[in-house]
Amino acid sequence: MRTADPRPVDAGRTANVRSGGFAVDRARWPDVAVPPDASWARTAITAAVVRRALRGLPLRVRFPDGTAIGAGGPVLDVHDPKAFHARIGSHGLVGFGEAYMAGEWDAPDPVAVLTVLAGHVAQLVPEPLQRLRGLWAARRPRSERNTPDGARDNISRHYDLSNDLFALFLDETLTYSAALFRGFPAAWDLLPAAQHRKIDRLLDLAKVGEGTRLLEIGTGWGELAIRAAVRGAHVTSLTLSREQRELARERAAAAGLADRVRIELRDYREARGTYDAVVSVEMVEAVGAEFWPDYFRALDALLEPGGRVALQAITMPHDRMLASRDTFTWIQKYIFPGGLLPSVEAVAETVRDHTALRVARRDAYGAHYAETLRLWRERFAERADEVSALGFDATFRRMWTFYLAYSEAGFRSGYLDVQQYLLTKEASTR
């Protein structure tokens, strides 16, 4: 399932009209346009399990026949119970997300609903079924392994969607990671300063200044590289996204810093040389557990003795990471193919067991990410017509709305967190 290359809907040939009242392109969204062909028995059993799981949650789940379950709280409206339960029974939480994309359920406040679900995620699947997860949960495709070639394709499927799309909901810095605010609630006009505050903190951790040879792994659209170059650093920045590279180069040149910022289309495993400092912001999530040792060994090999690594990473609880690391999730299918969030424990163990680096400091600020995502989500909703004008259809827009709400809920519930790490390397004793 590729999220790029949106095509217009030919309503006479490829579209199904879902309960949300919009057309779904069957050619582009095959698993959304048509619910799975689940048996009556499987759907009925799923309905019983789902209703039992939801009944004790602080939610109010309403059905078309006028019935409702739940202990009260945010409202979830199920518009098509048969399709909703068929999807969950066949594809679990992947099906739950696809049901939203299809308009088979909705909510006045999706973030509030998803926050409740994220806070009770371990209780949603009965314990006997959790123990049998390997039998019923889909396995992640081997084609999405983050080998050097696989990583290029996986990154392209998200970050090469369209620079114009990202510019519609990001602030003027084009920074696509957690901001660091002075206080809450955050406001849109404060977001650029909050993004600079986050970047400056990372550069300070890495002691980036005049003459620093800095390696950035994961360019984004170039704001960190530009800000480091303004400090006098000589920056080499690596990306696998062609669209990001071109725009980042343009932005560095426009800032008069082309001589200090070199942006390369290169995998972290292909980097050469050594550097005084390395910075990597929310890139480890795209590496995959299989390659975490390679990633941290690369940081170690590329860093001069006495150097410093500033790393920003989204993390999840260790037990949930272990339970889900081999399964195929909605976020992997539709948003970040090949991705996996590490746990704090996984980062510490990998650094300890595979490198000469030391975790010198770790600071968490997940609540700031929840606010960052809220601002992005609200901006995306405000500019829905402009997203449509770029060629992204209604199903894509529901998918992206669910992604932003789903992510925000993860941080609001405490299920997800974001960390800033300082990793150090002992100076040579020669």
Image (spheres, rainbow, N blue to C red):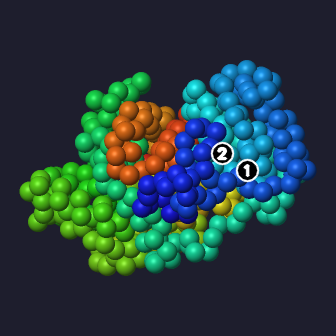
Q: Secondary structure at mark 1?
A: helix
Q: Residue 409, percent across and down?
A: 57, 37
Comparing 28 with 50, the one in front is: 28
Report the front residue among 46 and 27: 27
| Position of residue 84 measured from the top left corner of the image (x, y, whole percent) | 73, 43
Residue 236 locus on image (x, y percent): 25, 67
Where residue 99 is drawn, which disc sits there? 2
Classify residue 52 as left or right of residue 63: right
Label drawn at residue 87: 1
Q: In the image, what residue occupies the spot 41% across and 66% down?
A: 156
- Amino acid found under the numbered disc labelled 1: Arg
Give amino acid for label 2. Ala
| Residue 122 visible in image | no
Q: Residue at x 81, y 55 (%)?
A: 38
Is residue 369 visible in this depiction of the protein?
yes
Measured as percent of width and height from the top left, residue 158 is found at 44, 59
